Image: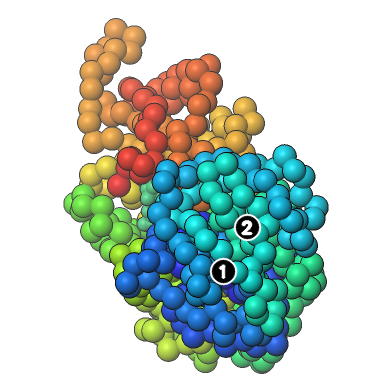
Amino acid sequence: KILILDFGSQYTQLIARGVRELNIYCEIVPCLKPVEITPDIKGIILSGSPYSVNEAHAPKPDIAVLAKEVPVLGVCYGAQLIAQQNGGVVAKSNSREFGRAHLHFKDKGVLFNTVSDETQVWMSHSDSVKELPESFTLLATTASIPVAAYKANNYPNPVYGIQFHPEVTHSTDGRQILKNFVVDVCGCGQSFTPAHFVEESIAAIKEKVGNEKVVMALSGGVDSTVAATLIHRAIGDRLYCIFVDNGLLRKGEFEQVMEGYKHLGLNVKGVDAKQRFYDELAGVSDPEGKRKIIGKLFIDIFQEEAIELKDVKFLGQGTIYPDVIESVSVNGPSVTIKSHHNVGGLPEKMNMQLVEPLRFLFKDEVRRAGKELHLDDIFLKRHPFPGPGLAIRILGAITPEKVAMLQDADHIYIQALRDSENYDKVWQAGTILLPVQSVGVMGDERTYEFTVALRAVTSVDGMTADWAHLPYEFLAKVSNDIINHVRGINRVVYDISSKPPATIEWE
Ligand code: XMP
């Protein structure tokens, strides 16, 4: 495997995904944690960073310690750090360099031997290497900087530095350059395929769980479904799944998803807790208040069910890699761990051991594993849906009547997206019930009813998003259908805000 030392760059995860796309396993580790070079580690990539190597408090692990054991590739900050530690000079560039640049090769070496002279690379830096240590070989320059790539010759293993970012798609041969490093320089095999992952994780679950039982909450989403399917392949019906109907799901979704689970052969108990959720949510309009109530009640219900099963030692979870990466904070070299919101608080409370087969996978890899397991598209291509469900799409206090109204409007919208083949083109879509009433006219009657907002966004990971440019005719039809068929709604609007500065959900 490859280790990626994270110095806090916004692109670190992209390096990891670039390596994974080559079917090579890699892990991200915080730069300040001491690294133990075990025999399975074949190479190390140093990420970029918001720091300057000339800042007093910049993180500066000794690269010689790493390069003594394995090859190293420094990207941006990583490249500057290696140069500085060998007596090179790093300073602010005269002009900060952002965006595309062209390499002028001096020596292609192994890193660039398959890369064309016309290749475009992506820069994003204010510092750069001004003077290279004497023993280093200059590999490439650009029109604005004297050192765009180099090879260091004074370590026992090959060490390269590149000023540009091979991990972003705008670097046209970025994947090829990464491949040249991890395959040709480090000698990694490209065997981390979905089939391999499925086989290995089933074996690992068998080994870990032995003859014990596992209990797990399902949500209908792709992560928990893939995790449950893997565990089920390993231990069969000693996996007990629980799917709670909180009354805040989409119309008919509970039944549809239960049917899908049965089809997969999972041992699932459906729990109808609708009324308990409605009772506790009555009169609550603060969004965070709603989230807290829903989270806590969910844990209570899950615990009640799990206790009935008796002697369960393991808790299955669909946690994925972005939830557990220890990221380097940009506000200081302190190491923070992102908290994940899967089923927060459960493991501590229940004193169980965790089984998290997807803990090291990115979302797209979870989908690929799901495909390998022959999961249906209703799971694999499903849009993300927030844990608190429609509760955070009804602005203000929640009533069962409002839930039913929103479910009907949402159903018309989502079905129309599917029928018009727009569903797979958007990343997430839903309807929001606004707490305003307005005047309308239907037939000869004056109406005074609610407004529904339609939301659809394109995105890669939900961190940033743009509103989807759905066709006018499509929006016209959905608006018409909702107003004609859903009692209580007389107005439909389309949300044309991007994130940032708005968010995807309204609460
Ligand atoms: P925002 O609204 O922050 O949403 O742009 C980003 C993504 O996160 C989902 N989301 C949630 N998911 N519990 C969840 O499990 C929550 O409380 C929650 N709030 C937002 C949202 O649907 C979108 O996919």
The quarter of the displayed image where residue 265 is located: bottom right
Q: Which mark is residue 103?
A: none
Q: Is residue 186 above or below residue 364?
A: below
Give the residue drawn at x 50%, y 57%.
130
Q: Residue at x 79, y 55 (%)?
A: 113
Q: Is residue 28 left or right of residue 502?
A: right
Q: Earlier in the sequence, mark 1 or mark 2?
A: 1
Q: SS of the residue at dot 1? A: loop
Question: In this figure, which residue is indicated by the disc labeled 1?
Answer: 133
Front one among 111 and 316: 111
User: Can residue 15 be seen in the rendering of this structure?
Assistant: no
Q: Mark 2 is on which residue type?
A: Ala
Which residue is painted at 33% across and 40% down in the image?
502
Ligand 1 within 8 Å, label 1 CB? no
How far across and down, in percent of the image, does residue 53 sit? 41, 66
The reply, left or right, for residue 171 in relation to residue 446 is: right
- 399 in relation to 368, above or below: above
Q: Position of residue 180 (x, y in %)?
A: 75, 61
Residue placed most toward the observer, 154 or 404: 154
Say whether residue 507 is visible. yes
Question: Vertically, is 201 above or below 113?
Answer: below
Q: Which dot marks residue 149? A: 2
* Residue 247, image x, y percentages: 40, 54
